[in-house]
Image: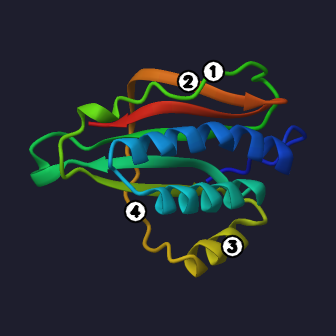
Amino acid sequence: MTSTRTGTWSASNVWEVMKKVLDDLMNHVATGLCDRTRAVRLYEDIAQVLVLEAAEAFQFQYNLPQRTAPRKGTQYSVNADGSVQGGDESGGLDLYSLPAGTDFAVTIRLNDGPNAAKALAYLNGRGWGGRGDWLAPRDGNSRVYAHNGYALTRTEVGD
C-alpha cells in the first residue's frame, strides 16, 4: 500500500472525476450487470473513500459463469501527483461481450495513508466485506479520467 496524498487532491476534483466512473457504472446497468440502486451506491462508496484520500485503486471485476472463461475486470488507479492534465471521455468498456450470468463485484485497495482506517470503517458500515481478490494488470484498452491534476487511470486486468 502507498499513500497518494498530494497537492492536486481536493474533494471537488474527486467528485468531478467520479462523474465518469458513474457513467461507466450506468453502462453496467444498461447491460444488466447491476441495477441502478447498486450502481449509485457503489459510486457513492468509492467516491467517499477517494474523498478520504484512502485508496490507491479500485477494480470492477467480472466473474464469468461456471469459470469456463478467464476472470477479468477494469482497474481505476489514483494519480494525484498533478502529472495528468488532460483526460478521456467515459465509455469504451466491452460489457456486452460478457456472457449471461456474469457476476459483477468491486474491490477497493486502500493505501497506507492516515484515513485508511476511517475508510475501512465506513465501508464496513455500508456492508462491504472481505478482502477480495486483486487481479493483475494486462495489456489492453486504457483511459484517463482527470480534473485539475487529479486522475483515475482505467486499465484492463485479469486473465
Q: Residues within 10 Å of mark 2 (few under 14, many from 20)?
A: some
| Disc 2 to disc 1: CB gap under 8 Å | yes
Q: Which amino acid lies under the numbered mark 3 shown in the image of this protein?
A: Ala
Displayed quadrant of residue 87: top right
Question: For this view, does 38 lie left or right of residue 88?
Answer: left
Q: Pointer 3: what residue? A: 117
Residue 56 percent across, percent down from the top left: 63, 48
Marking on residue 143: 2
Q: Is residue 62 shown above or below 156?
A: below
Label 4: element kind: loop
Give the mark nearest the N terminus, 2 or 1. 1
Closest to the observer: 42 or 136? 42
Question: For this view, does 130 lie left or right of residue 48?
Answer: left
Q: Which amino acid lies under the numbered mark 1 shown in the image of this protein?
A: Asp
Give the mark nearest the N terminus, 4 or 1. 1
Marking on residue 75: none
Give the Cα distance between marks 2 and 3: 30 Å
Question: In percent of the image, x 45 and y 24: which residue is there?
Answer: 92
Give the mark nearest the N terminus, 1 or 3. 1
Give the Cα distance between marks 2 and 4: 24 Å
